[in-house]
Image (cartoon, rainbow, N blue to C red):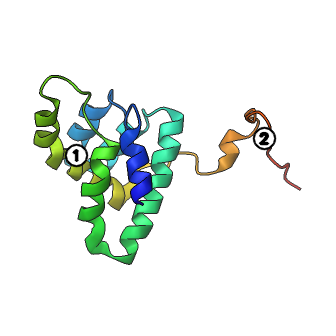
């Protein structure tokens, strides 16, 4: 989990994107945050949406073993998933926004299956994608 968090934190753009940062934060404050966050998540680029859906499934599985771990997972993964674009005084901005980021992460972890229910869940999404040099292309088997 630590390696995954580090990889997410080092992405040039967060998984939940700079462009949707304010939308995610505002959605988490709504009366129905799950529905509001689902609407924002639907705007993510397809690869981000698929990755976020699978990540939330993983984090929910970790949380299922110890429900008290959700806040800890949100604190650990929240800033890696969602952060404002760096600007002057960025550290101060992130520190001020940290409680909001953690709130978004908690709702995502607790309700990821509802928020990302329309995200493709199968690797078949990538069927027909060209393989890297020396690799094999992913193909979709025909139903029998």
Residue depicted at x 25% and y 63%: 72
Residue depicted at x 50% and y 53%: 54
x and y, in percent, of residue 96 in the image: 10, 40
Q: Residues within 10 Å of mark 2 (few under 14, many from 20)?
A: few
Residue depicted at x 44% and y 34%: 44
SS assignment at label 1: helix
x and y, in percent, of residue 19 in the image: 33, 26
Location of the C terminus by quadrant is bottom right
Please, which residue is most extreme toward the bottom here?
65
Is residue 5 in view?
Answer: yes
**Quadrant of the rendered image containing residue 110:** bottom left
Location of the N terminus by quadrant is bottom left
Please, which residue is most extreme toward the right here?
144
x and y, in percent, of residue 87 in the image: 19, 23
Q: Earlier in the sequence, mark 2 or mark 1?
A: 1
SS assignment at label 2: loop
**Quadrant of the rendered image containing residue 131:** top right
Measured in 3D between alpha carbons, the distance from the residue under mark 2 to the one under mark 1, in whole angstroms, is 39 Å
Count of all numbered marks drawn on residues in the image: 2
| Circle on res. 135 | 2
Please, which residue is most extreme toward the top here?
88
Q: CB atoms at circles 2 and 1 under 8 Å apart?
A: no
Residue to which mark 1 is pinned: 101
Residue depicted at x 15% and y 35%: 91
x and y, in percent, of residue 61 in the image: 44, 68
Is residue 15 in view?
Answer: no
Q: Identify whether 128 is placed above or below 19.
A: below
Q: Residues within 10 Å of mark 1 (few under 14, many from 20)?
A: many
**Quadrant of the rendered image containing residue 97:** top left
């Amino acid at each position: 989990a630590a390696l995954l968090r580090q990889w997410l934190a080092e992405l040039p753009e967060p998984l939940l994107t700079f462009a949707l940062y304010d939308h995610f934060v505002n959605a988490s404050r709504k009366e129905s945050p799950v529905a509001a966050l689902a609407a924002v998540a639907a705007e993510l680029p397809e690869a981000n949406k698929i990755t976020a859906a699978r990540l939330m499934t993983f984090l929910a599985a970790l949380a299922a073993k110890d429900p008290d771990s959700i806040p800890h997972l949100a604190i650990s993964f929240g800033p890696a998933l969602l952060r404002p674009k760096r600007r002057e005084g960025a550290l101060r901005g992130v520190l001020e926004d940290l409680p909001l980021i953690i709130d978004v992460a908690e709702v995502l972890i607790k309700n990821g299956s509802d928020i990302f229910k329309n995200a493709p869940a199968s690797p078949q999404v990538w069927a027909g994608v060209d393989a890297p040099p020396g690799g094999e292309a992913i193909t979709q088997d025909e139903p029998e």
